[in-house]
Amino acid sequence: MSATRDRLGVHPLYFREHEPAVAGTIAELLRASPSPALRPDREAIARYLAGDPDDRHSCIEGIGLVPTGHTLSWRERGWQLQPPPPLPEPRGTLHDAMVDAVADLLAAPRRTAIALSGGLDSALVLAIARRELGLDPPVITLAVDVPHYGELETTRSTARTLGAAVHEAHVSARDFLAQLPEAVRLAEVPLWNPHPVSKLLLAQAARREGFDAVLTGDAADNVFGGAFGHDYLPLVGRLLRSQGVEPCSPFFDPRVLAHAARLPADPDKPVLRELAARWLPSSIAWAPKARRLAPDFGIARLFDPAILVHQAERLGLPPPRLDDPRARCGHTTLALLWDALSRETRPCAAS
């Protein structure tokens, strides 16, 4: 038995540490072998709450996570992990690799929409599609009706610059809060900020419009900027695919990865900005990156604080600082996660 996880870790792959069982979700493993009690991996949970997971452990003791790009094989003495092979030498230029990657993704036999946000990376994808390839793919954006959150005006400006019509899927703070439990159940990790819920809302909107895939700029920060991706890219994959929508990005493409691997990581991504300047005005190509964090959305309404304090004690975690928005979100979503996973196993001991 063997299985390989994708090189960027967009699609999580879990395994039972002492038996030959592998699955794409923790819930699948719990349903297949429900007898062991559900016990927390306290160190892993603490790292998830801090936004610093190690890409090797799930939140559940005895269930491991295959690191990105690794191959997991079952042998007589147990599991063995093999690291990913080296990337090939890049061919041509980064420009060629990006254009070929976008062209191949849009040529696939499925209904694909470009998911446009207010950032550089998705703007670059749309610019390649329209100005280099001469295509007019459908474009969708999540129009977030929440003050000081969302990038709708910037997105509209980019679309006008490129002559693209955009379908706007409007969502509210109420939608974020309503979908938070489902997002946590699907992600199978606690969240320190509600922003990833936007991926579930985008996937639901894309599915309603009949799209099978969304083409995004996801992973550009990780591939070219050196950003940490273990706390985000798996959520992108899990939440989009939960609605039958395939996540696509030229930054997942091995041809693009081969070029990026031979460049110094720079959070400002100057190589991509220079590429974008071929098709986009400098106001877009060289605009400073804006970090997107969601507001609280009234998460405190989901659980009484005493429940969260009791849960932390029960799981052997330090008392939560519920006056801090990050800790409040983390411990609330941990409670949601534990409830969801407990329903998958019998007995559901929490240690």
Image: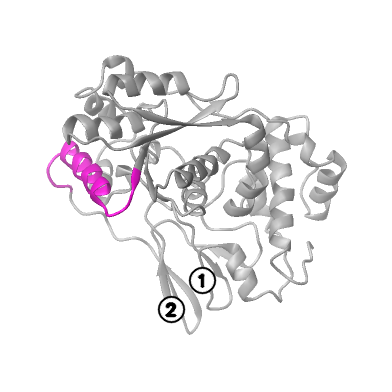
Q: Quadrant of the N terminus?
A: bottom left
Give the percent coordinates (x, y) of residue 6. 38, 57
Q: Is residue 101 magenta?
A: yes
The stretch in magenta equals 90-112
- Residue 147 numbered tag: none
Colouring scheme, one of rainbow, by chain, secondary structure, one colour: one colour
Q: CA distance from mark 1 to mark 2?
A: 9 Å
The answer to whether the residue labelled 1 contacts the one labelled 2, judged by CB atoms less than 8 Å apart, is: yes
Q: Is residue 191 above or below residue 345?
A: above
Helix, strand or loop for the magenta stretch, by majority: helix
Percent position of residue 17, x then y: 57, 71
- Determine which of the numbered discs, if any, sits on residue 22 in the image: 1
Q: Is residue 308 left or right of residue 198?
A: right
Query: In the displayed structure, does residue 47 sit left or right of residue 223?
Result: right
| Mark 2 element type | loop
Q: Residue furthest front?
A: 209
Q: Quadrant of residue 153?
A: top left
Q: Is residue 197 visible?
A: yes
Which residue is disc 2 drawn over?
1
* Extreme residue toward the right, this view: 306
User: Quadrant location of the C terminus?
Assistant: bottom right
Give me the residue at 67% from left, 37% from top.
Answer: 177
